[in-house]
Image: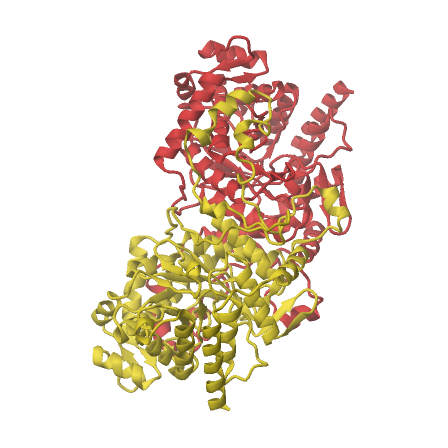
Chain colours: A yellow, B red
């Protein structure tokens, strides 16, 4: 099993003993908690939303595309009614899977089928760690999260800026950040849909990094964007520009309504899902009207608010159920499914961990193809935590090992060893054990399995303290992946030219 | 939904806002990760183990029962060969579900069907909390864990002594401890199978507590025992006496081999499961030979060791897979399935939490009927932790809420509310929300969803600190459940009489 091989250096115990780079494949039966009738009812409700209530598309180009395809303006409103036949016809062109290319071909990522892709935390306004505490996002922390994302094999792609580097000018931030992403990692990455030209800039940088012609680029997914509906029932102009530019260029769009039940969506999970589904399908359909066959992903983010405070709550039982049903919906429409590893805790403590593992339970068993915020999210997304990043990588590795099916054959059943050991014996010395013990079991990164006395005498470290030390060690040993000098030069020239144009 | 109603006192915010007492019902499809072929192969291997390798039963009464039923002594050994026909014939009498009676009829517990029963931590030699640290088990801590087990509605039964009260004389400990269990709680409990007379003493105390005649007691499950195989392939004398006495009295026996892969079982999950299955079926068959139809449970405890240290590892990917396949095996034989909420951490930290939630993921989705050590286990069972107890109750409550299916109907889909709010609006003010918001979402016990600044200004508490405060508050408010004076008197008289006889 290639996934069992660990990365070892010349030293006996490397800083980071981890699984070899691979995408986990989920071969287990998925957990489908909604009946066929319930799923039909949610679908039917979402069809009535797009047809009867309608959705606002605050962008003339998007409106024109939809109207040309058969949408109708709802009188005395900015809303468009989207006939279900038009919607479903458009959806029928969406691919069920695609490959997102990285500049290192070993890091191409499959989105769809039964593969899982884990993205690092994205878009946090703050960075935090145990030593320095919580601070505003900045380029140094941004780069450090990129270095961690490159170092941990279980991270397959960047989900966005792990932390927003607000010390970089907003107008040119996408240029600097994308150059950092390309130079500090060799994994796929994301572009924010904040302005049309920025999408085009990053697509061009990606074309250079991948070494493609313009024509090739149009058929090679290499950078993706997240498009959030401004729920309820509205898509804003820059997001719609993002859909149009990205789909035109054949680059993946992840459509994710932001349907917090009780705030931007009905207080019921069924209602929030119906609204999510309506908004998601509308966005997905638009990508296919722009370019049939354009890579697109169904995003689910439905969670609930804490009704005492109105604050978003994540990793809750409601989130679990919403994500498992969202997976069923995405499969109904034949598109890959995106969910998230979320929590609302203020610290990398037990709460952060249970909210994350409940999220993983629901999203993995619910058939998620692409997991956003898979490592480092804290505080409902307001902070990117260095300690949580390492903890999450450990969780993701455990998920990957869990998804390796148990081999059952005569050698594994080991009847000879059982007969040899007999009643009251011990298996450690048997040939059956000795042949296998090095790689028999998953080796976690942080788990402290020392006995109590040894652990206590070592200072009784809790997990978040071990995670703190580990992230610093990994950063210390980080090495940038090689990049061809001509590509680097071309990228730097583009960044210079575009930055000068802006300033 | 009765499970959504919260227990409220006259005060506006009671110390413990929790779900109403109920047993969660798992109506979701179970996760079956082993193919039918793989399951057949494990079954076949376990049949070859009981037939060809054989098992030691270090108790003449048990041997006599098995030999009379068709077992054969394997020459030059203490092992018996159990023909598969005999084994499967005996197994065919085992009930698929039964009810364990409590002295409070509202706390009877269904074991089997698709109900879940959560047991408190059992058998830890140490107790621990943040303030006093780790100390040897004692009666005060034992009683405090009983008080917590009574106070938290999500705990359905005692799994044993949460912590071993070694300040009580070993000879009469079962009498004092059972009297505590009956007076401090009104939920079902456990008896250790350490000596035949102790089983009989506790059965008699239970008969008194339930107010039954001897004849009635023989048909009323009211106290259960865990019987561990002394793996590999051996049952010790007191455990076999436990099987015989309990089955004779119609009291439930939970047969649980202790098959740590790489130590007491093969280093492979398939091999460890084959051995677990052989040992479990042998024990279950014995209960049915003693008394056909006696209540019995298939216990799975297969996990792995840390191959670096030899220490047991829990809540690992291997444990997850072993438990899900164990559930499939138990269902194959038509008996309820027992698993555990386990972890090997030394502190109630992130590791303890992820190992627990991974355990819950596997055991709940794997169809567990009875979850041992559901609250309070720490350090691979060497400590019972007061903080972990509260954390686990929160996890179990979230599982219970997750298992409440999402209702999907017109009222829940809320199209009128979606139309009313329209694009860019907010749902909080709608009638749809106002009618539902109080009980719309699961309310956790410990989750801290305050914003960062408020949380920081409150001292930045981590979860284990909140759990510490909560357990002390709950103990402070604890009230013992009423017990009829005549029963109490009879029980005290029995304890006095038996204690005098022993001393």
Residue B482 seen: no
| Apparent side of residue A134 relative to residue A198 in the rendered image (left or right) | right
Residue visible at 52% across and 52% down in the picture: A397
Residue visible at 45% across and 78% down in the picture: A490
| Apparent side of residue B468 relative to residue B256 in the rendered image (left or right) | right
A49 or A159, nearer to the observer:
A159
B415 or B349, nearer to the observer:
B349
B402 or A442, nearer to the observer:
A442
Residue B326 seen: yes
| Apparent side of residue B161 relative to residue B240 in the rendered image (left or right) | right
Q: Residue B412's spot in the image, x, y percent?
A: 37, 63
Q: Residue B233's spot in the image, x, y percent?
A: 54, 22
The image quarter containing residue A57 is bottom left
Does residue A77 lie above or below A153 as drawn?
A: below
Q: Residue A445's spot in the image, x, y percent?
A: 60, 51
| Apparent side of residue A319 relative to residue A57 in the rendered image (left or right) | right
Q: Residue B290's spot in the image, x, y percent?
A: 50, 17
């Amino acid at each position: 099993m290639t996934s069992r091989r660990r990365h070892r250096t010349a030293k006996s115990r490397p800083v980071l003993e981890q699984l070899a780079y691979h995408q986990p494949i989920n071969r287990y039966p998925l957990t489908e908690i909604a009946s066929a009738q319930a799923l039909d009812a949610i679908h039917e409700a979402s069809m009535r939303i797009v047809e009867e209530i309608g959705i606002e598309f605050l962008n003339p180009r998007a409106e024109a595309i939809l109207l040309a395809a058969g949408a109708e303006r709802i009188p005395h409103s900015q809303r468009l009614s989207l006939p279900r036949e038009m919607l479903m016809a458009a959806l029928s062109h969406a691919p069920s899977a695609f490959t997102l290319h990285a500049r290192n071909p070993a890091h191409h990522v499959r989105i769809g089928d039964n593969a899982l892709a884990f993205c690092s935390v994205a878009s946090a306004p703050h960075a935090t760690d145990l030593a320095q505490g919580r601070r505003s996002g900045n380029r140094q922390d941004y780069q450090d999260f990129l270095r961690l994302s490159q170092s941990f094999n279980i991270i397959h792609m960047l989900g966005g800026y792990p932390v927003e580097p607000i010390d970089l000018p907003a107008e040119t931030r996408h240029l600097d950040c994308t150059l950092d992403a390309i130079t500090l990692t060799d994994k796929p990455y994301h572009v924010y849909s904040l302005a049309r030209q920025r999408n085009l800039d990053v697509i061009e940088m990606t074309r250079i990094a991948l070494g493609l012609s313009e024509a090739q680029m149009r058929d090679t997914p290499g950078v993706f964007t997240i498009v959030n509906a401004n729920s309820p029932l509205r898509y804003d102009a820059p997001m719609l520009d993002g859909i149009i530019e990205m789909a035109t260029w054949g680059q993946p769009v992840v459509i994710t309504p932001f349907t917090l039940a009780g705030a931007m969506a009905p207080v019921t999970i069924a209602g929030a899902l119906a609204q999510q589904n309506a908004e998601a399908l509308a966005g997905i359909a638009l990508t296919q009207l722009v370019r049939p066959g354009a890579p697109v992903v169904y995003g689910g983010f439905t969670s609930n608010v804490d009704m005492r405070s109105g604050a978003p709550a994540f990793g809750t039982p409601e989130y679990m159920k919403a994500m498992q049903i969202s997976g069923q919906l995405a499969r109904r429409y034949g598109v890959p499914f995106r969910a998230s590893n979320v929590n609302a805790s203020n610290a990398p403590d037990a709460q952060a961990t249970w909210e994350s593992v409940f999220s993983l339970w629901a999203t993995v068993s619910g058939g998620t193809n692409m997991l956003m915020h898979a490592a480092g999210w804290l505080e409902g997304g307001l902070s990117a935590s260095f300690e949580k990043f390492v903890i999450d990588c450990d969780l993701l590795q455990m998920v990957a090992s869990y998804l390796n099916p148990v081999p059952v054959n005569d050698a594994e059943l080991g009847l000879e060893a059982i007969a040899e050991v007999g009643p009251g014996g011990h298996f450690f010395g048997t040939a059956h054990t000795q042949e296998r013990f090095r790689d028999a079991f998953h080796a976690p990164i942080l788990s402290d399995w020392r006995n109590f006395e040894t652990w206590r005498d070592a200072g009784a470290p809790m997990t978040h303290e071990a995670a703190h030390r580990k992230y610093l060690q990994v950063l210390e040993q980080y090495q940038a992946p090689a990049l061809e000098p001509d590509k680097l030069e071309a990228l730097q020239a583009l960044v210079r030219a575009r930055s000068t144009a802006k300033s």
